[in-house]
Amino acid sequence: MNETYKIGVIGLGYVGLPLAVEFGKIHDVVGFDINQERIKELEAGHDRTLETSDEDLAAAVHLKYTTSPDALKNCNYYIVTVPTPIDKNKRPDLTPLIKASETVGKVLKKGDIVIYESTVYPGATEEDCVPVLEKFSGLKYNSDFYCGYSPERINPGDKVHTVTKIMKVTSGSTPEVAGKVDALYKTIIKAGTYMASSIKVAEAAKVIENSQRDINIAFVNELAMIFNKAGIDTQEVLAAAGTKWNFLKFTPGLVGGHCIGVDPYYLTHKAQELGYNPEIILAGRRLNDNMGFYVANRTIKLMIKKGIPVADSRILVLGITFKENCPDIRNSRVIDVIEELKDFSCKVEVYDPWASPEEVKHEYGIDLIEKPSGKYDAIVLAVSHNEFKTMDIAKIKNGSAVIYDIKGLLDKNLADERL
């Protein structure tokens, strides 16, 4: 197809920016975000999320950044990559998606195509977003304008599976539009594309990817609890079982981030709306949501067994990002460990060389320490940053201090317990 692409990317976070940059290397792209500081930072040639290198930003010569919706008027493709979080009751919060749809609707023209990448439940694009596009544009869906859905598969911090190297699922609101959407992504995706039969199928495919991972991690988390009671090291069990070719190699841990800890609630919301009460998915979610409290309580019990006074004890938590070697703190469940320890009147200090102190303070109300100092009564290794592999933990432990290794990063003989 010899089509001229003028692409507007709405939302320049972990998902939108890498996409805008790759498209911006060969097509005219307008990167839109409501955060003025984010735009200034990108115009200066740096991405604080570290998902995109300064070199890649410089290579996107056809990419312009803006906070003005008017700058999107000349686009013929709009790609929405805003967050889809959950609220305090763990229900889908479509506010960012609806607001982004309003922004696009105001500049939408006949023949334009709007593609959504944000994770949603099956049906959300056409049931929730399309009416907003119609209302604010005055145009008719599948007559004047069209839609597509191509779920994001970004893995924050992963420098191997980057956006162009991950197969892209695509879809469109008509067969012709599906072909156009697929052709658009084919211009940058080296790993190839997979055209789903409908938008709903593509939406469902995305939401079950992370639900599947969530359930598998919940399984090994439950195993860790059982093996702890049996006096067996979970890591050793998994290593032995992993010698079989078809054993799924999942490890126990805290399940946070913008996807795995959130997406299953989108699927269960839709299921309940349809009159079905999901059991396995919600059971996995409940178990994973409680792992932080489990770790904190195990740490306290180990301290009591060693005769370490709990009240006013100094506890060091290593890491607060949701995964290793990545500055992303979104929906980090390390906060559950911290808050539970504080409830026992412990003095908790948090050290993370990857996280932004300003973001952590804003998101969680916690002041990160510049580096560990003095001696600690307990140390909880929560995130396996490379920096922690070479830390001299023994130097900062107070005598028989408890060391709880959530990630299995430390020498087995150094940790009192591993998850």
Image (cartoon, rainbow, N blue to C red):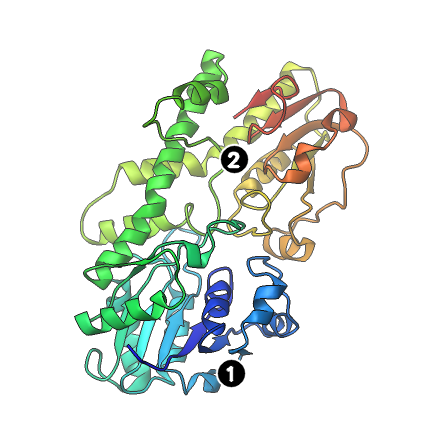
Indicate whether 45 appears above or below 402: below
Measured as percent of width and height from the top left, residue 284 is found at 35, 36
User: Measuring 55% from the left and 31% from the top, which residue is drawn there?
Assistant: 407
Q: In this view, does 305 lie to the left or right of 232?
A: right
Measured as percent of width and height from the top left, residue 415 is found at 63, 21
Callout 1 secondary element: loop
Neighbourhood count class around disc 1 (C-alpha, 10 Å): few under 14, some 14–19, many 20 upward: few
Neighbourhood count class around disc 2 (C-alpha, 10 Å): few under 14, some 14–19, many 20 upward: many
Q: In this view, does 88 lie to the left or right of 303?
A: left
Q: The disc labelled 1 sits on which kind of residue?
A: Ser
Q: Is residue 321 left or right of residue 76?
A: right
Of mark 2 and mark 1, the one earlier in the sequence is 1
Quarter occupied by the N terminus: bottom left
Give the quarter of the image for residue 241. Answer: top left
C-alpha separation, residue under disc 2 versus residue under disc 1: 41 Å
Measured as percent of width and height from the top left, residue 144 is found at 23, 84
The residue closer to the viewer here, 191 or 99, is: 191
Label 2, on which residue? 292
Residue found farthest to the right = 374
Callout 2 secondary element: helix
Label 1, on which residue? 68
Give the quarter of the image for residue 311. Answer: top right
Q: The disc labelled 2 sits on which kind of residue?
A: Gly
